[in-house]
Amino acid sequence: MMVARLADDMAAIELEGLTKDYGTVLANNDVTFDVEDGEIFGYLGPNGAGKTTTIRTLLGFISPTAGTARLLGRDVTDESALLEAKRRLGYLPDNPAFDESATGREILDLHASIKGDERSADLLELFDPPLDREVREYSHGNVRKLGLVTTFMHDPDLVILDEPTSGLDPLMQQRFAEFLRAERDRGVTVFFSSHVLSEVRRLCDRVGIIRNGRLVAVEPVDALLDRSGKVVHLRADDPIPAAALELAGVHDLEVGRSADADSATGSRAPEAAADAFTECTFTFTGDVNALLERLREYRLLDLSIEEAPLEDVFMRFYGDSEAESASALESPAGERKNAGAATEVTDDA
Ligand SMILES: Nc1ncnc2c1ncn2[C@@H]1O[C@H](COP(=O)(O)OP(=O)(O)OP(=O)(O)O)[C@@H](O)[C@H]1O
C-alpha cells in the first residue's frame, strides 16, 4: 500500500521549462515534467543528453538559464528554501567524492553528525562496504555501497540517484532493486538517472527520456514496453502466403531464418519466394488473438512470442535521423490505433 509522505498533491520534483545554456551547449532545453510523491522515476538518456545537468540544477549547484525547478515544493534558486528541502533529500552523485584519507566509518560518522542517522545499521547489512579501510583503497563498487548508505541513512523522503548501479555486481544490483522497491512502498520517492535499459524495466514506474537536452517522452514504463510490441518468430510445415500476415500491427517482417538461428554462419537465409514462406520473424504491436486466428489454418512447427528488446524502442528515440525519431515520438496514439484495428479484424473474422 502506498504511503504518502508529502503534503496533498505535492509533486516531489517539479520542472517547468527548465533550460540550461552553457554557451556552447544547450544542455537542458525547455524541460518540463513532475516526479510524483512515492514513485520510482527513471530519467533516461545517452551520454551527454543532459541528465546530470537537470540533477545539478535540482541540487542548486548550477542555476537555470530559464524556467523553474522545485524540489519538495521549494524553488531551487531560493537558497534557504532549498536548504530546508535538502534535509529531506538523499543524493547519490555519479562519482561520490568522499575524503580519500578517511575510513568508511569516519565518513558515516561525519554524515550522521550533519544530517542524522536513523538506519545505517540496517543499511550496512544490505550494502556492506569495508568500513575500517580508507576510501582510497575502495573499489568503485565499494564507493557506491558506501554512497548508498550515506544517501539513505537519514531516511529521506526523496532520493536522487545518478547512475546508481554502476559498479555494482549483479547480486548487489538485485539487492539494490529489491531495496528500492521496498523504499518506494515506505513512501520514498526515487528519481534516478540511467542509461541501463534492463535497470529501467526492473525498477521504474515511469520514465522520462531526454535526448540532446530535450525531453522526448514521459510515460509509464509499461506503455514504453507495450509500444515496443512483441517479437514473433514462426516456422511452418508448408509455406504460409504473405497475405496471411497482412494484418494491422505486423511490422518489419523478415522472411527466412532469423539471424539468431543462423548465428553459426552469421548470415541470413532468405527464402526464394517472398510471397510464401515457411519461416519468418516480425515485430507485432496488434492483438495477439487476431494473429492466432490468422495462423489457425496453418500447421506450425514452432511459434514464439517474446517481449521486444527495449533497445529497439530506444533506437526509435535515438535513431540517426531526427525526422525518424520525431515521428516515432509523435505516433504512439497512431500505433495504439493500429493495435485497435487489429482487434477489429478479429471481430470481423
Ligand atoms: N560545465 C559545463 N560546461 C559546458 N558544457 C557542459 C558542462 N557540463 C555539461 N556540459 C555539456 O552539457 C551536455 C549535457 O551534459 P550532462 O552531463 O548533463 O549529460 P548526461 O546526460 O548526464 O551525460 P552522462 O550520461 O554522460 O553523465 C553535454 O554536451 C556536456 O558536454
Image (spheres, rainbow, N blue to C red):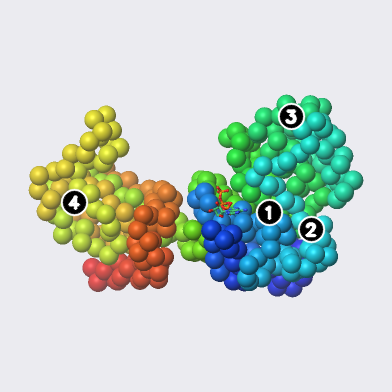
Q: Residue at x 31, y 54 (%)?
A: 283
Q: Which residue is more in the foreground, 247 or 79?
A: 79
Quickly name the residue at label 4: 298
Residue drawn at (70%, 67%) of the image: 70
Q: Which residue is mark 3?
A: 136
How crowded is the residue under tag 2: few (<14 C-alpha within 10 Å), some, or many (20+)? many
Cα–Cα span, label 4 and label 3: 65 Å
Left or right, 296 with reference to 229: left
Residue at 77% x, 33% y is 100
Q: Counting residues from the N terminus, which is met first, the one under dot 2 or under dot 1?
A: 2
**Amino acid type assigned to the residue bearing label 3 in the image:** Arg
Distance between the alpha carbons at the discs numbered 1 and 4: 53 Å
User: What secondary structure is found at the residue carrying circle 1?
Assistant: strand
Tell me the number on the disc at residue 86: 2
Q: Which residue is mark 1?
A: 160
Left or right position of 191 against 313 = right
**Picture layout, residue 305 above or below residue 20:** above
